[in-house]
Amino acid sequence: MLRTDITNFPQVLKIKRIVEETPTVKTFYFPWEVKGEIPGQFLMLWNFQDEKPMSISSIDPVNDEIGISVKMVGPFTQSLHKLQENDLLGLRGPYGTGFQIAGSKVLAVGGGIGMAPIATFTEEASKIGVDVDVITAATTKEEIIFQERLNTTGANVLPTTDDGSHGFCGFATELAEKLIKEEDYDMMVACGPEIMMKKLLDISNQYQLPAQFSMERYMKCALGICGQCCVDDVGWRICVEGPVLWGDQLMMISEFGKYHRDSSGVKKYF
Ligand SMILES: Cc1cc2nc3c(=O)[nH]c(=O)nc-3n(C[C@H](O)[C@H](O)[C@H](O)COP(=O)(O)OP(=O)(O)OC[C@H]3O[C@@H](n4cnc5c(N)ncnc54)[C@H](O)[C@@H]3O)c2cc1C
């Protein structure tokens, strides 16, 4: 069982079970004493060679269990996808800000693996009676994640695919704007590709809808020491002041939707 009183040391834990969500996404469950983890917070995963940030995709205080959903994109995530039940991984955290649950009717938007924190948000918000419309967006049907799991929360689950193979045909941003025009939301939460979140930020400003976004930047220490994930102008460390920020905070980050920095600090334009 993880000792959550010493969060900055990686705790080496056995993988309890693995769920294959899609051909490219697996969820890894670990024994974990849940102590107020918030949807949107993240953990650092250590494969004994490298360490990378991953959002908490499931929080289960009843079974003392936490989940991390990993999309295979490169060397680190490929190494995780090779792991089996009972294999070991290092985990430290939780870190960063999470989503604030506010209002009685909320639009939640998750693009691709961005659904990881959006799923936990939807579960927690639904539990306390918030009416959630959740857009789970993917390029194609087989990459939609968490649809069945979210159907059990009572939330209104709206799958969306770019190619129209399942649910709404088009981008999550198009469905979000349509819903915002038709419904009376108090708030929006979003996580996904930055290009999607920039468009959602513009939409939230246009319709004056308060919104929170989970932002990604290259992270190393996750402790606010190394400065790797600082963003231009405001200098916020996304691992500490983020990753979840309100729309008016994002408006102050000049690089949002334009560029990010790689592991050496070199600018990479989206
Ligand atoms: C707060 C936060 C939460 C995240 N949550 C998830 C999640 O729930 N599930 C998931 O699959 N992925 C998540 N990611 C992204 C994940 O960290 C990267 O996909 C992973 O590090 C890629 O490593 P790689 O070696 O497989 O791929 P690489 O080929 O090394 O990189 C692929 C992409 O991941 C980015 N990346 C690589 N290393 C880091 C790093 N140390 N910090 C941030 N980005 C990095 C690169 O910039 C590149 O865009 C999250 C990132 C952040 C910052």
Image (cartoon, grey):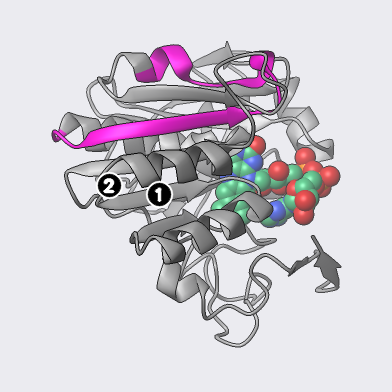
Residue in view at x 65 percent, y 55 percent:
194
Q: Secondary structure at mark 2?
A: loop
The region drawn magenta spans 128-150
Occupied quadrant, residue 204: bottom left
Mark 2 burial class by Cα count in 10 Å: few <14, some 14-19, many 20+: some
User: Looking at the picture, which amino acid does disc 1 mark?
Assistant: Val
Name the residue carrying label 1: 189
Occupied quadrant, residue 95: bottom left
Name the residue carrying label 2: 185
Q: Is residue 11 visible?
A: no
Number of marks in the rendered image = 2
Q: How far across and down, in percent of the image, does residue 3 sit?
A: 35, 43
Q: Residue furthest left?
A: 129
Residue in view at x 61 percent, y 64 percent:
221
Q: Nearer the viewer, residue 143 or 88?
A: 143
Mark 1 burial class by Cα count in 10 Å: few <14, some 14-19, many 20+: many
Q: CA distance from mark 1 to mark 2?
A: 11 Å
Residue in view at x 14 percent, y 33 percent:
129
